Amino acid sequence: MDLDALIGDPATRIIVCCGAGGVGKTTTSAALALAAAEAGRTVVVLTIDPARRLAQSLGLEELDNEPRQVDVPGADGELHAMMLDMKRTFDDVVVAHSTPERAEQILANPFYQSLSSSFAGTQEYMAMEKLGQLRASDQWDLIIVDTPPSRSALDFLDAPNRMSRFLDGTMIRLLTAPARAGGKAGLRFASAGFLFFSKIISKILGGQLLRDISAFVAALDTMFGGFRERATATYELLRRPGTWFLVVATPEPDALREASYFVDRLSSEGMPLGGLVLNRTHPPATTALSATRAEGAAEAVAEGDGEAAEFAAAALRVHAERMVHAAREQHLADRFTSAHPEVPVRTVPAAAGDVHDLEGLRIMGEALTGPDADTPTGTPRTRVLPARRG
Amino acid sequence: MNPDPSPVRLHVVTGKGGTGKTTVAAALALALAADGGSVLLIETEGRQGIAQLFDTPPLPYEERRVAVARGGGEVKALAIDVEEALLDYLDMFYNLRRAGRALRKMGAIDFATSIAPGLRDVLLTGKIKEAVTRRHDGARVYDAVVVDAPPTGRITRFLGVTAEMAQLARSGPIKTQSDGVMAVLRSPQTQVHLVTLLEDMPVQETADAITELTKAGLPIGSVVVNMATEPVLPVARMERAATGELTGADLAPALAAAQLPGGMAVADALAAEVVEHARQWAAQDALRDEVEDLGRPIVELPLLAGPIDVGCVFELAGRLEEHLRAEVAA
């Protein structure tokens, strides 16, 4: 996968980094953004929940829900970064789409307050919304998006639709039917359904919550069109030429399974996949010595006396473990590739510690965008171990 | 069972994504079942991680035995299906099973579980409370319940959502139900355990979660340090290696004596690997102080070689058993 070409191509306007939780999506997004800025692009990275020290190094302590420029000495382009404030983004949408009076009603509604801070999928929806806003403002020629730490990578694609389906769904129509369906056909069914529904729901939730929901729905009624259109428009944005998805995974069965689901989903949605970033691999420093041989030698060496023998035996044991570990990682990567032969893969070795400054991001960016074969260990960046000869 | 069993009966296991909380929850359930205990392991996130771990077909919404522990103990597992739980709930409290099915056809259940803020979590915690307090012929059905809970970022909201719900629904049956659930969750029979790795982010999130949970009045149990690198050398040697002074030249004579190929290039590579190992260990070791400062009992689990399977779960369970015994004694 040639990420260097991808981020350097002026036709690339949006890169979305997806993957299961805990695989390093945020760091990958930030590293790519930095590399793109250094390559001369004017880039903004939208992060969802960066580690505190990484956020600090990107100057993201201020939560104003707007991009801030990051000082990158010597870069040809510009790097801007922001952290998503979910509730604030939702509030802004409400304010932008209704009258001040109505917006006030909505913002004060206890049900809205819960919805905007805890509805399953709100974060994904708001990430999409923010992406739409950033794209519409046209201040950046490249937008890199980190996705929320969901259980499933698919949530990012599903949540906005779920939200707009909800706003457009039978239940909402039932809830709002008495207010707006003045004598239309189907009213009888709607009202009967509504009564039945509200009876059950009020049994479960208590009458007060139901009244809050109804008030919220009635207040929102005028902006439904706006919500739905926006969700659909942003979803379409993801299908437009110029948008690329990168799937991030670690060499572990769960993360790669998620990556597989996501790859299948992208292809069925007709969304463009840049490739798989296989993050935090553990390539050994040499592959000249097999695990078996190293292990055997460790036993032999350990019989010797002194510090030198002890160090040598330890080094051999460490190496044997790393060879086994790398073989397992390579096996998992191969399994992914045999299921998805069309998907290019780029491996990124695990950093010694957490990546929390521009220098760390630069090193990671180099692993992501550097020439394929030119690594210190000689292992191609598409693999954890070199391919077996012959 | 232990002669003096711990008062804790509900173990909620949380941790940052990728810290191995499902594995730890499963190992803890096995540890609690040793010596004849009956333990229920509950999955809340619908990913069938428990079934994968115990190598069984996907769990249906019913309590199934997944493992037998020493001394006739057993672990049952339950993957909660939110829609089914809501139907159960309607049935249990309102005799509304048939109406519930009709509602499901209309899409109302899907609607209710996705829109009502936290209704999912309310149903999950309600089901957990039911399992903890369930009795059969006067005796408790489960000696302990272990929950593979949502990650640290969501745990306080997950456990506290019933309290939030009680505020939203200021009257009505859900209020009563919520109060009952919170009473169990905040009682000494509950402990929230936090799984962390010796890495900055997970330790930081653990600290944040402890602050939040404490504020919400939820009792905190142990901190489980998972996947700790075991040093290959005595500490003093590890420290020397971590400084990076070790080079290929130090190793080359011993390697040559063992007739290994590759000469200096391999020696240098091996030195680099052992230095990296030592540095990783040192970086982890440096975080142990921060974990200590959390002020909670700590149990450390090693990084196991190879993919995690049932054997690994039993091995980790052994380590947790010692910790539980020490906790009860303390």
Image (cartoon, coloured by chain):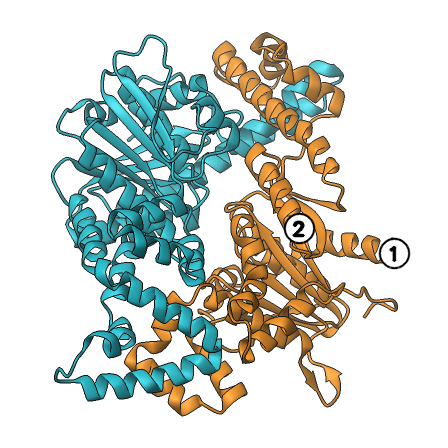
Chain colours: A cyan, B orange
Q: Nearer the viewer, residue B118 or A239?
A: B118
Q: Residue at x 67, y 59 (%)?
A: B28
Considering only vertical position in the picture, is B186 above or below B244? below
Q: Amino acid at mark 1?
A: Ala
Q: Residue at x 23, y 83 (%)?
A: A190
Residue A278, percent across and down?
36, 36
Q: Residue furthest front?
A: A101
Look at the image and tell me whether residue A73 can be seen. Answer: yes
Q: Is residue A179 left or right of residue A82?
A: left
Mark 1 surroundings: few (<14), some (14-19) or many (≥20) residues within 10 A = few
Residue B84, picture quadrant: bottom left
Q: Give the CA distance from mark 2 to mark 1.
A: 28 Å
Count of numbered marks = 2
Q: Nearer the viewer, residue B293 or A181?
A: A181
Mark 2 surroundings: few (<14), some (14-19) or many (≥20) residues within 10 A = few
Considering only vertical position in the picture, is B170 above or below A268? below
Residue A37, percent across and down?
28, 19
Residue B102, picture quadrant: bottom left
Name the quarter where the C terminus of chain A is drawn. Answer: top left
Q: Nearer the viewer, residue B11 or B62?
A: B11
| Label at residue B215 | 2
Residue B241, percent across and down?
65, 17
Q: Amino acid at mark 2?
A: Lys
- Residue picked out by circle 1: B329
Q: Which secondary structure lies at badge 1?
A: helix
Q: Nearer the viewer, mark 2 or mark 1?
A: 2
Residue B94, percent across and down?
50, 89
Q: Earlier in the sequence, mark 2 or mark 1?
A: 2
